[in-house]
Image (cartoon, rainbow, N blue to C red):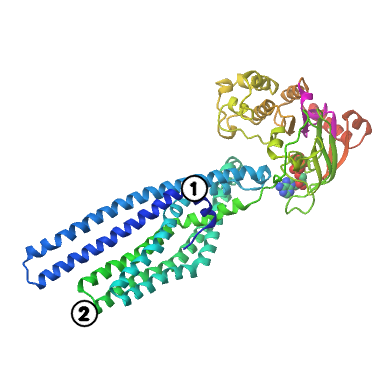
Amino acid sequence: MLINRTVLRFVTSARGHLALTVLLGLAASAAAVGTAFALAEVVARVLSASAAGSDAGRELGDALAPLAVAAALTLTRAGLLWWRDQCAVRAAIDVKHRVRARLVRHLFALGPAHARRTRSGGVQATLVDGVEHLQAYVGFYLPQVVVSLVVPATLVGILATRDVAVAVLVAVGVLSVPIAQRLWKRLLGERADVHWKAFESYAARIADTLAGIVTLISLGATRRAGQRLAEQAEQLRAATSANLRASLGVYIVTATAMSAGTAGATVLAAVHAAQGSLRPSDVLLVLFLAAECFRPLQDLQTYWHEGFYGLSAARGIAQLLDTPPVVAERPDAAPASLRTPPALSVDDVTYRYPGATQPALREVSLQIPAGSTVAVVGPSGAGKSTLVQLLLRDLDPDSGTVAIDGHDLRDLPLNQLRRTTALVAQDVVLLDGSVWDNIRLAAPDADDAQIMAAVRAARVDELADSLPNGLDTPVGERGGTLSGGQRQRVALARALVARAPVLVLDEATSALDAENEALVTEALHGPGADARTTIVVAHRLSTVARSDLIVVLDAGRVVEAGPPAELARMGGAWARMLQIQRASLQTAGAVR
Ligand SMILES: Nc1ncnc2c1ncn2[C@@H]1O[C@H](COP(=O)(O)OP(=O)(O)OP(=O)(O)O)[C@@H](O)[C@H]1O
């Protein structure tokens, strides 16, 4: 019997329907046993009537009543099995629903850093296909485990009342089935693991390929992508075959034990009948009861095959649920009273990504005064986005402290932090719905005037004029019907509507043209700007020139920090960056 603890954790929610599934399974077995007794009675009456020399009509008349009982019980059994299947499906749907809800909650709790590191296709495979596969395992296999324990034990007891030796023989056959399954359990578990990993990787590869289909076509790399897909499909096929081979081993042992057990018991009963220690009609009863003894185990075997994918998926589900969040809320985390807007500070922070050889940030310290706009600049790979993730507490520092109004971020509830901050990242993700829906997402209670103010500040009004239905125009999957710059403007409006006291813009205007970028930057520095603390990461220096403070990062260290005018006078890293960018703009102008 293969029981998965993770699945069992969710089964309690459907215990009513599962208990009914078990009871109906037991009742169906009882009906089958009743049928066996009734049929044995038919044979007994026919035999005794023919021994007494009665005519054929009389023989049939005597057998009619038990025959009718057998027919009624057969129909009853069919009805019970139909009802049982309904309950099984209801129970499985309930469990699937709970597992999915728990997984989604856990994925949210795992946080943005986990989402960035994980292949979304693999997670999707677990969430959609994996959970779907639980249906046969939960609804049919698990209840059948109980039926398989109760029915054979009861029937061996009944057989013992007729013939102890026959009962012992059947018991040996019955016991060999779970023993064989136990011997195979480890192998089956290992194969299930390998199979699920192969399935997850294949699903993730398909998702990656679909997400990058435009790039693959434009690079002429479709053949290679197809080959890699085929390789992974082959790995999945091999894992599935290995799995089926292992299951087949158990299947052969089980099937042999069942056939040999039933046949052996019947032959022994026949011998005992010939010796006169058993009624001839009991031979038929032994045949029926022995078969009925093995039937639940046979069904268990069938459900095992159907539920096998559920078991391997359950391992993937367990793995995901056992993954600890990248940042965890402390049990004693309590909301702090923060000023609006708050100040932020980074004190001697070092952070290295798991598996990386070098820290992405080393001994970084900086102060972000309340209501100021602080720009973080530096070459690619300098650690700007890492710093942003630490400020948002998507990551925790290995050493040092990030604090808001003097409170270590780790002491605050994550909810409070999420409400305090709003991020506009470079890769904007819009959700399916209209432009308006997307802007409203972060602040469902915002009134129309607030939304329209954000729409104007982020220049979305101008964009809406060019859309067929204005702000009500659907943005398509992931905002696919909008350009990159248009998506960024919608995301900016969305963040402004949220009115979070801390606004973080990580290359948030990189896709805007120079004119729109200047207007959006103007709006961000306009009225209401000092009601929030703003952190801007940008490569384009015009975006950050009006900031109160510039922090220059290089190779994970702060190499310079101060007001832009002061840094420009100092002639250091910031001044050099300005020079380089001006020179390139002049060159571009000369070319034009
Ligand atoms: N998930 C990750 N795992 C391992 N290393 C990472 C990860 N993310 C970033 N890094 C590394 O950390 C360093 C800092 O990366 P980060 O993204 O913070 O730089 P950045 O300044 O934002 O770069 P860019 O301007 O190109 O966005 C880089 O060396 C990068 O390769």
* Number of the label disc, if any, that sits on residue 276: 2
Amino acid type of the residue that numbered disc 1 sits on in the rendered structure? Ser
Residue 69 in the image: x percent, y percent?
Answer: 21, 57
Q: Nearer the viewer, residue 370 or 113?
A: 370
Query: Left of 81 or right of it: where is 367?
Result: right
Q: Quick one: label 2, few (<14), some, or many (20+) residues within 10 Å?
A: few
| Circle 1: element type | helix
Of the four image quadrants, the one with ligand 1 is top right
Is 488 above or below relative to 128?
Answer: above
Question: Which residue corresponds to the image point at 40% horizontal and 68% vertical from the top-left?
Answer: 254
Q: CA distance from mark 1 to mark 2?
A: 54 Å
The reply to whether residue 420 is in sight is yes
Determine the residue positioned at 55% across, 59% down: 193
| Pointer 1 residue | 13
Which residue appears at 23% of the width and 71% of the height?
Answer: 282
Note whether ligand 1 is within 8 Å of mark 2: no
Report x, y in % for residue 89. Answer: 41, 48
Q: Which residues are magenta?
A: 528-550
Q: Is residue 292 left or right of residue 498?
A: left
Q: Are marks 1 and 2 in contact (CB under 8 Å)?
A: no
Where residue 260 is drawn, which disc sits there? none
Depth check: 106 or 432 in front?
A: 106
106 in the magenta segment: no
Residue 352 spot, x, y in % from top left: 77, 50
